C-alpha cells in the first residue's frame, strides 16, 4: 500500500472541504476534490474502511449532480460491489442500490426505473417493513418514476400508499405523515384534480393549525397550496381573495420583505393577472421588484422570475 503524507486529520479536513463545495452548489469542483482525497484515503486506510466507502458515495452524488448519470451509476455500482462483499446481501437493498436505480432512471426509460423500484420496494417491504424510512424512500422514488413514465394515476396511488403506511406506522400526526399528505395532494392536483387536491389541503391546514399553531410556517405553506389549487379550479378571483388574506397574515407574522412574504406577493400578482386585473398585477409586481432587490440583490433568480412575469402581464394589458 502506497504511503500518503497526509495525517488522518488532514484527510478528513479535505473531505469536509469537498463537502463544503458540494453544499455551495459546485458539484464539479466537489467531485474533483472527492476524487483526489479518495486516492490518498485508499493509500492510507484501504478500500474496506468506512471512510473510503463514504467518500465513494459522496463522489457518486457529486458526479450525478454534475449531470453525468452514467458515470455516477458506475461509481455506485463499484461501491455496491464493495458493500455486498463486506456486509452481505443486505447491502443490496440499501441506499447505494437505490442510487444506482436513480441514475439509471435519469438516462434510461423511466418505465424500466419503475420496474426496478417496484422490485426494490417489495424487497425492502419484506426485509425492513413497509414503514421503515428506506422502504418509504424507495416508494417515493417509485411514485416519481411512475409520474415520469406518464402513469399519473399510479403516481398518485403510490403516494397515497405512503400516507397510509406512515399513518399506521408512525401515526397520523407525525411530521412525516403530515408532509406526505401534502405531497400526495400536490400529485393529485397536478394530475388534473385541483378540486380534490384543495379539499385535502384544507383538511391538512386544519390539522396543521392544531399541531403547529395558526401562525406556523406549516400552516402558511398548506394554505398557499390550497389557494393555488382554488385558482387552478377556475376560480381566479377567489384565489386573489385568499392570497390577499395570506399576504396580510404573513406580513403580520413575519415582515413585508421576508422571502416567504415576497413569494406570496408574487402569487397574488399572478392570480390578479389571471383574473383579468392586469393593471393591479403590474403595480404589485413593480412594488415587489423594489422590495426583492433590496433583500436579495439585483441578480437573484427570484427577481428574474418576477421580471419575466411582469413582461408577460404587460404584454397582455
Image (tube, rainbow, N blue to C red):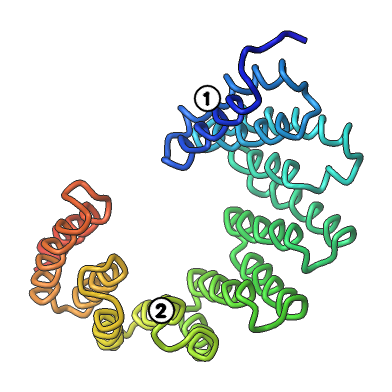
Residue at the location (60% across, 72% down)? 180
Residue designated by label 2: 229
- Could you tell me if residue 201 is visible in this image? yes
Residue at the location (79% across, 52% down)? 120
Residue 198 in the image: above or below residue 163: below
Density class for disc 1 (Cα within 10 Å; few <14, some 14-19, many ≥20) is many
Density class for disc 2 (Cα within 10 Å; few <14, some 14-19, many ≥20) is many
* Residue with the most extreme right position: 88
Tell me the element at label 2: helix
Q: Position of residue 216 (x, y in %)?
A: 42, 81
Residue 184 in the image: above or below residue 81: below
Cα gap from disc 1 to disc 2, whole angstroms: 44 Å
Tell me the element at label 1: helix
Residue 188 in the image: above or below residue 16: below
Residue designated by label 1: 33
Q: Is residue 315 left or right of residue 256?
A: left
Q: Position of residue 98 (x, y in %)?
A: 72, 46
Along the viewing direction, whichever of 15 and 308 lies nearer the viewer = 15
Foreground tag (1 vs 2): 1
Considering the image in quadrants, where does the C terminus appear?
A: bottom left
Q: Where is residue 35, by image quadrant? A: top right
Q: Is residue 277 left or right of residue 300?
A: left
Considering the image in quadrants, where does the N terminus appear?
A: top right
Q: Where is residue 293, by image quadrant? A: bottom left
Amino acid at each position: 500500500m502506497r504511503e500518503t503524507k497526509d495525517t488522518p486529520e488532514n484527510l478528513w479536513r479535505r473531505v469536509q472541504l469537498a463537502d463544503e463545495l458540494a453544499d455551495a452548489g459546485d458539484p464539479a469542483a466537489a467531485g474533483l476534490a472527492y476524487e483526489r482525497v479518495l486516492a490518498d484515503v485508499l493509500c492510507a486506510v484501504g478500500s474496506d474502511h468506512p471512510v473510503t466507502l463514504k467518500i465513494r458515495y459522496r463522489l457518486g452524488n457529486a458526479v450525478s449532480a454534475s449531470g453525468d448519470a452514467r458515470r455516477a451509476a458506475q461509481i455506485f455500482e463499484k461501491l455496491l460491489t464493495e458493500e455486498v462483499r463486506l456486509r452481505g446481501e443486505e447491502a443490496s437493498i440499501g441506499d447505494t442500490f437505490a442510487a444506482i436505480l436513480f441514475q439509471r432512471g435519469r438516462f434510461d426509460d423511466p418505465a424500466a426505473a419503475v420496474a426496478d423500484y417496484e422490485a426494490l420496494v417489495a424487497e425492502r417491504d419484506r426485509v425492513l417493513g413497509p414503514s421503515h424510512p428506506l422502504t418509504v424512500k424507495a416508494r417515493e422514488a417509485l411514485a416519481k418514476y411512475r409520474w415520469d413514465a406518464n402513469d399519473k394515476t399510479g403516481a398518485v396511488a403510490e403516494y397515497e400508499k405512503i400516507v397510509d403506511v406512515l399513518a399506521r406506522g408512525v401515526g397520523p400526526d407525525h411530521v412525516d405523515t403530515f408532509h406526505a399528505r401534502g405531497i400526495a395532494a400536490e400529485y393529485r392536483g397536478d394530475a388534473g384534480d385541483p378540486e380534490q387536491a384543495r379539499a385535502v389541503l384544507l383538511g391538512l391546514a386544519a390539522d396543521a393549525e392544531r399541531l403547529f399553531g395558526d401562525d406556523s410556517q406549516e400552516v402558511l405553506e398548506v394554505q398557499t397550496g390550497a389557494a393555488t389549487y382554488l385558482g387552478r379550479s377556475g376560480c381566479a378571483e377567489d384565489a386573489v381573495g385568499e392570497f390577499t388574506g395570506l399576504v396580510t397574515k404573513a406580513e403580520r407574522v413575519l415582515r413585508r420583505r421576508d422571502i416567504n412574504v415576497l413569494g406570496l406577493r408574487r402569487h397574488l400578482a399572478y392570480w390578479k393577472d389571471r383574473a383579468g386585473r392586469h393593471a393591479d398585477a403590474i403595480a404589485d409586481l413593480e412594488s415587489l421588484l423594489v422590495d426583492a432587490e433590496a433583500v436579495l440583490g439585483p441578480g437573484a433568480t427570484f427577481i428574474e422570475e418576477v421580471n419575466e412575469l411582469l413582461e408577460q402581464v404587460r404584454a397582455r394589458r
